[in-house]
Amino acid sequence: MTDAHTEHGGLAARATAFAELHSAPEILQVVNVWDVISATTVADVPGTKALATASHSIAASLGYEDGENIPLEEMIAAIGRIAAATDLPVSADLESGYGDPEDTVRRAIGVGIVGANIEDQMRPLADAVAQMEAAMKAGQGEGIDFVLNARTDAFVRAGDRDPAEVLSDAVERGKAFLAIGATNVFVPGLLDEHAVSTLVEAFGPQRLSVINVPGSLAPARLQELGVARISYGPWTQRVALTALADSAAELYAGGALPGGTRPLN
């Protein structure tokens, strides 16, 4: 990687390109990564347009539980190594901002990150909006078109609440985040077609970001409904770990390495 990768002009160009991917009619899929080798492997797959980190996966790879248990210095170092390994735009999952979203986002930009997820964790709405404003302020201060994927945890923290109320909360919070300049609203959870359609109608086309998990709507249908972006969170690391565990069991049973294994590292 040349020094130009870290120059402001190159960073600004990647940020703008990343923002444009979210407004394009074709849905943006980001296959989440957690270290340099997973990042370079995915980056080399035809069709990859951008990368996104998964905080859960990075924490797990370094021996921490998810939920901001990893020290911020370690998270910034990890995402910085990923950003330095590719010319593609990289978005980072920065959880709820590690106590200071503005400073955390500024530090992330400093290591080459051009977008981020920030979680509201269902804080009081005014506090959640202030979080998102702080993240946006960091991008503005650095002079780039920073992509804020503002996350509401309405569904993942719903418990046994009335689904209609949960959906209403997600709509209210998402609209508030868009009003202060967020690029997209990220609503993780196992969303049915009614929920996706309601959210797209409330936010507008190409403003909703979702996570796909087992049982989720197919990418083609999500594109038809007007979703901007699909990510996969910790599930991509789980795919890799499942293959590792299955291969270990096969080897212990006297088997061989899987046919077609490629030296991607």
Image (spheres, helix red, strand yellow):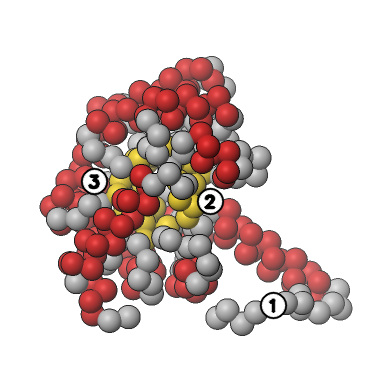
Q: Camera-side residue: 46 or 2?
A: 46
Q: List the residue tagged with mark 2.
A: 232
How many circles with numbers are drawn on the protein? 3
Evaluate whether residue 56 shows in this view. no
**Three-letter amino acid code at the position of disc 2:** Tyr
Q: Residue furthest right?
A: 254
Q: What residue do we see at 54% from left, 20% from top?
A: 163
Q: Quadrant of the N terminus?
A: bottom left
User: For the residue carrying disc 2, how many other residues have a C-alpha within 10 Å: few (<14), some (14-19), or many (20+)?
Assistant: many
| Looking at the image, residue 211 lies above or below residue 128 | below
Q: Is residue 238 left or right of residue 45?
A: right
Tell me which label, 1 or 3, sits earlier in the chain.
Answer: 3
Of 96 and 205, the residue lying toward us = 205
Coordinates of residue 217 in the picture (x, y in percent) = 61, 38
Residue located beneath label 1 in the image: 261
Residue positioned 76% across, 75% down in the render: 258
Nearest to N terminus: mark 3 or mark 2: 3
SS at mark 2? Answer: loop
Q: Are marks 1 and 3 in contact (CB under 8 Å)?
A: no
Q: Say which quarter of the image contains residue 133.
A: top left
In the picture of the structure, the residue carrying the numbered disc 3 is 135
Please tell me whether mark 1 sits on a helix, a strand or a loop: loop
Residue 28 seen in this snapshot: yes
